[in-house]
Image: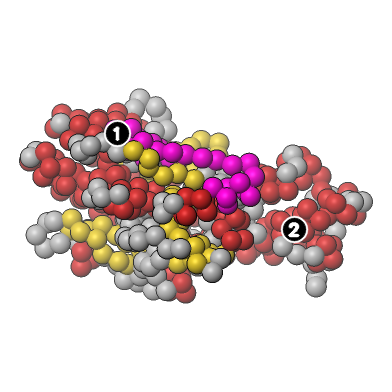
Amino acid sequence: MEINFTHHQSAHCENGVVSNLMKHNGFSVSEPMVFGIGSGLLFCYIPLLKVNHAPVITYRAMPGHIFKKFAKRTGVKMKREKFSNPKDAKTRLDENLEKNNPVGLQVGIYNLVYFPDEYRFHFNAHNMVVYGKQDNRYLISDPVMENVTSLSEKELEKVRFAKGAFAPKGHMYYPISFPEKLELEKAIVKGIKDTCKAMLAPVSFVGVKGIHKIAGLIRKWPKKKGIKTANHYLGQVVRMQEEIGTGGGGFRYIYAAFLQESGKLLGNEKLIELSKEMTEIGDLWRDFALEASRIYKNRSAQTDSYNKVADQLDHIADLEKVFFKKLKKAI
Amino acid sequence: MKKKEVPQDKSNLESANFRELCYAVDENGEYTTENSTGWEPKTVALNNAIDDINERIDEAKARVMKGETSPIEYYMELHKMDVGILASYVGFWQWKVKRHFKPSTFKKLNSKTLNKYAEVFEISVEELQNISK
């Protein structure tokens, strides 16, 4: 069977699934709106953890958090299920499809066959919608893809039961009840306040302070780790900032889009002005990525060039500090 | 970023025939979306990361040949895993997986354990024991 589900491509999978499921249920909510209300924007350096043999930085909230916060703030109720047994997971999925209910799934990317090989690594917090089953193949709406696709039963089971950090354990979710009228205004204010709080947090590895922290580390890498490792680390920073899903500039552009949309909705001119400012900050993040790529492209670089990109980050951190203070006051 | 500045560089996305979505402003300053075929700074970063993985695979292979480690470590690198990820797939503690890297320990593994590894790597036990094939 095939549920009449419209696929809209999004930049990021988590926002995209929420936005698409909301649209399916008759509520027009854009991807930036989901991201902003769910307080998706963040900067966080995760000490001690290594992925792909490099330090981990995230430009967004922890997987699942955007979703949870969005649902709570808008009054949408979600049903979530995890499974220890793949058979049960499949049965529950099939039951939902029988009932014409498209569901969101958390999956691992490594065995996602329709992704290009180069992008398949062990990351378990990807999200997709399953909207039907035909000839024993599941119909998949993966929000980051331009078009819909499909997976065999075995292929889907594999990605639902990927192992490692954030193992999905068959995680399946879907909205079960909605408020009579979706009131975004209050939810927007809550979402913005939460983001400002996180970005200005007095914690050395979070938000604005976290950006300074990374800048400091970058200055040390070439001496402490050697050029080869320093370049590998720097490449990873750029990947986390710009890889598929961020919409560009480490989610700063999506956030600027959210501020613009919110400004119009709330009739708040200040938010529209701040949206422009956020766009400019996003451009600076892009400049940083470009400059960093010049270092790791040549594979041989002087300590000077590391200091130069670190300076760029320190500058961005200073601007974001002022920005989030203004944003806090604007609502 | 302006809509017309959204980069359209060559990238590895081409092989899967899709373009990613970026957010940008149009001529009137309104936010909109635009598809991108890729951006060089991140393509270079990705390619470097892949080179790095290939180097790790080659090194592991050489060490297997020299009898310094078991083929398990080679297959782990081949599947872009680290000890933690591999341990969770086979369901052993990390220290146990590390012990299986020792060629002498590896030789004594029973068929049940070997099968577990072979299944995770999607190969036969024979391929697991002999990587030159």
Query: Which residue is disc 2 drawn over?
Result: B119
What amino acid is found at the position of numbered circle 1 in the picture? Gly
Taking A136 as reference, is B29 left or right?
A: left
- Residue at image point 30% right, 44% down: A35
Query: Which residue is disc 1 drawn over?
Result: A75
Q: CA distance from mark 2 to mark 1?
A: 44 Å
- Residue at image point 63% right, 41% down: A84
A258 lies above or below A144: above
B93 lies above or below A53: above
Please, which residue is most extreme toward the right here? B108
Where does the image place residue A105, in percent across and percent down from the top left?
48, 50
In front of the other: A97 or B13: A97
- Residue at image point 60% right, 55% down: A157
In front of the other: A195 or A5: A5
In front of the other: B16 or B58: B16
Q: Helix, strand or loop at disc 2? A: helix
Q: Is residue A35 magenta?
A: no
Where does the image place residue A268, in percent across and percent down from the top left?
9, 38
Q: Helix, strand or loop at disc 1? A: loop
Scheme of colours in the image: secondary structure
The range drawn in magenta is A63-92
Mark 2 closeness class: few <14, some 14–19, many ≥20 residues within 10 Å:
some
Q: Is residue A68 magenta?
A: yes
Taking A111 as reference, is A262 left or right?
A: left
